[in-house]
Amino acid sequence: MSSETNSIGKYSDWSKEDLISRILELETPKNEQNGTIIKRDQKPQKKSKPFDFSKHHTRFIALKFSYLGWNYNGLAIQKEPTPLPTVEGTIIEALNKCKLIPSLNPGNFNFSRCGRTDKGVSALNQVISLKVRSNLTPEEQLDPNLDSKEFDYINILNGILPSDIKIHEISLRPPQGFDARFSCTSRHYKYLFHQQGLDIELMQKAAKLYEGSHDFRNFCKIDGSKQISNYERTILKSQILDLGNGLYCFDLEGSAFLWHQVRNMVAILFLVGQKLESPGIVTQLMNIQETPTRPLFDMGSDIPLILYDCKFPEMEWVKANKCAKYEKTLTSVYSQWIELNMKTQVAKFMYEKFVNDDDIFQNSNERRTRINLGDGKGKIVGEYVPLFKRDRMESFEVVNERWKKRKLNDKN
C-alpha cells in the first residue's frame, strides 16, 4: 500500500475541526535553529534593557502607612526565609516593581524603620524613610509648587500593595538628618482586650505604676546578639481606656520599648485583673534589687497589639491625592473592613449559640485556672503559682556572655 493511501486512511475518520487544526499546524513554520514554533503574524520579542538608575534623579522621603499584621511575619525584612511574608519585604518588592528603588537590598537606598513590630502585630502610623527615584531635579525638589510634577508615590504604591498594607501620608522634604528610627520622639501602642473575667479598676491601678522611668528587664525578652545592658525606659502614659461594648484597651506611650515589652506588660495586667496578683506586682518586678531576674510567665497574644502612632518633631506630611487610584484604594480598604465586620458578626451569632455564662474564664474545677492572654483562649493551668514562687530566667549578663563566647568560638 502506498504512503499516499496510508495518509488518506489516517485522516478519514478525523472530524472537520481536527483536520483544520492539523492543517494549521503543518503550515506553521519552525525556527530552523532551535525548533520552536513561530506564528506567522507574531513579531519577535525585543529583550528589555535593564533599568539604569544612574540616569535618574533621586530624593529622600518618609512614608507613613498602616497594616493589618496577622497575615505577616512581622514588620522587618529578614535575612533568612520566613513562613509568612514580612510587611517591609512586601513594600520593598512593590517599590522595586515600579522602579522606585534600584534593588531589594535596603542598604542600597538608605532605608530606616521607626518601630519594629512582631509577627501578627498591626500598625496604623508606622514610618519608614528611604531614597527613591524622582521625576524632578534636586533643585526642583526644594520647590513645593512643583510637587504636582513629582511621582504620585502614594497612589502608585497603593495600586500594587495588598489591601492589608496601605500608605496614607508622605513627607517629600523631611528635616535635615531625618531618620525614621532615631528621629522618633515617642511610640504609642494600644492593646485591645475584652473585660470578661477582669477587674478593670485593679488593672488601672497597676497600669499607672508603669509611668515614669524604670528598669524593664523583667518585662522583655533578653537577646544576647543585641548585647543590651541598659534596660531603663521611660513610659509617658499608661492607662486603661473603655472603648464601649465590653471592649477596653491598654493605652501606652513611651520614648522607646524593649523586645516584647508591651506584650509582657499587658500579661502582668491580666494577672492583676484576674486577681491572681496584686497591682503592687508591677512595682516589685521593676525593683531590680528585689527581683534581679524575671519569673517565668507567658506574654500576651500578638493579634490585639497595635502600633498606634509614632511621633516626630514638627515636619510636613501630605495625604494621598484624591484621584481615580485613590478611590480604588479607598474601596479596597472599605470592602476589607466590611468583610471583617460581617465575619465578626457571624462568629458572634455562633458564639451565642453555645454560651450560657458570660464568664468563660470560670472553670467547674476550682483547682484549674485559665490565664487570660488576650487571645480568647488563654492558658489552662493547675493551681495558680504566684510569680515570686516560680523559676527565674537567666540574667542578661549570663545571656550576653554566652552569646559572646559562642561568637568567639565560631570565629576560631
Image: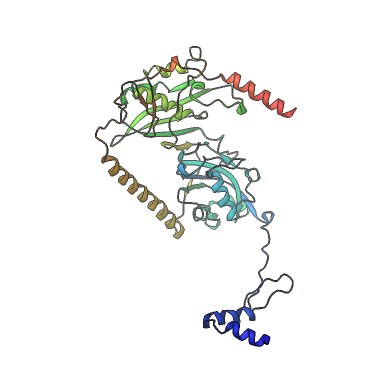
Q: Position of residue 23 (x, y in %)?
A: 60, 82
Q: Nearer the viewer, residue 256 or 139?
A: 256
Q: Which of the image's four quarters has the N terminus?
A: bottom right
Q: Position of residue 334 (x, y in %)?
A: 38, 52
**Is residue 213 among the parts visible in the rendering?**
yes
Q: Position of residue 62 (x, y in %)?
A: 54, 44
Q: Nearer the viewer, residue 18 or 110?
A: 18
How many discs mark residues in the rendered view? 0
Lateral position of residue 323 relative to residue 95, left or right: left
Give the vertical position of 268 relative to 53 (above or below). above
Lateral position of residue 172 relative to residue 209, left or right: right
At horizontal 68% and vertical 75% (from top left) the residue drawn is 30
Quick one: which residue is furthest to the left in this view? 356
Applied colour scheme: rainbow
Give the vertical position of 398 relative to 315 (above or below). above
Snapshot quadrant of residue 274: top left
Snapshot quadrant of residue 251: top left
Q: Which of the image's four quarters has the C terminus?
A: top right
Quick one: which residue is furthest to the front in this view? 1
Q: Nearer the viewer, residue 33 or 297?
A: 33
Snapshot quadrant of residue 189: top left
Q: Position of residue 301 (x, y in %)?
A: 43, 33
Give the vertical position of 218 relative to 87 (above or below). above
At horizontal 52% and vertical 41% (from top left) the residue drawn is 73
**Is residue 172 among the parts visible in the rendering?**
no
